[in-house]
Image (tube, grey):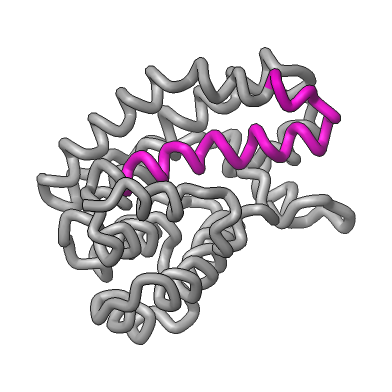
Amino acid sequence: MSRAALLVLADGRFPAGGHAHSGGAEAAVVAGHIRNAEDLAAFCRGRLHTTGLTAAALAAAAAHGHDPSALDGAADARTPSPALRAVARKLGRQLMRAARATWPSEELDAFALARPRGGHQPVVLGLTARAAGLAPEDAAYCAAYETVGGPATAVVRLLSLNPFEATAVLARLAPDMDRVVEQATVSAHGPVDELPCGSAPLLDILAEAHAGRPVRLFAS
């Protein structure tokens, strides 16, 4: 297992397209739900313990060796918003391109062939971690960190928030991330149907509203 591979995969500069997405933060800013660092912390914590847990569990399960097609169906069932399903598949397609170039793998090739329009991003993330020789826990950490790292970075741009404050928000969420990763990793050893299915209805509503906005800084 390579710690360096985990750093490469978790790096925000890994060319997987995440920089173009705010994780729902832009829509929350527009709606007035995020106005400062305190609001950002509440938003990230809520996202982490709902959709973040779901994504981390899917990623850990894929890294553990569960059937990726079954996991992709489970991801669909856990993503009620059509806009977010489209985003997840677009990000999955972009991650797949980067992953296959970085860590060539027959499993990645097979899933890319099975899902030419893109698999859900957490599933591809788990397969990528597996190809890189990482453990399910590592895949869960990547997914959990992406859940909060994307919004924090986006809010710096959206509100001109002090980046030191945004980084402090992420650092203070570390214990929450540890708990989410532990729960996700344990669940990855069980049946796919019993994976966590936490949801955040307001995020779904905001995502649909954001998708219909004619002017926006981030794709989602």
**Magenta-highlighted stretch: main secondary structure?**
helix
Magenta residues (range) = 139-165
Q: Position of residue 94 (x, y in %)?
A: 54, 70
Q: Residue furthest right?
A: 215
| Viewer-side residue, 159 vs 204 | 159
In the rendered structure, does residue 176 fall within the stretch colored magenta? no
Rendered residue at 65%/32% (across/down): 152
User: Seen in the image, is 102 located left or right of residue 60?
Assistant: right
The answer to whether residue 93 is above or below residue 167 is below
Q: Position of residue 161 (x, y in %)?
A: 80, 25
Residue 102 sits in which quadrant? bottom left
User: Seen in the image, is 23 located left or right of residue 194?
Assistant: right
Residue 32 sits in which quadrant? top right
The answer to whether residue 124 is above or below residue 178 is below
User: Seen in the image, is 209 located left or right of residue 92?
Assistant: right
Q: Position of residue 134 (x, y in %)?
A: 25, 53
The answer to whether residue 115 is above or below residue 126 is below
Rendered residue at 40%/76% (across/down): 100
| Viewer-side residue, 200 vs 39 | 39
In the rendered structure, does residue 152 fall within the stretch colored magenta? yes
Rendered residue at 44%/77% (across/down): 101
| Viewer-side residue, 27 vs 132 | 132
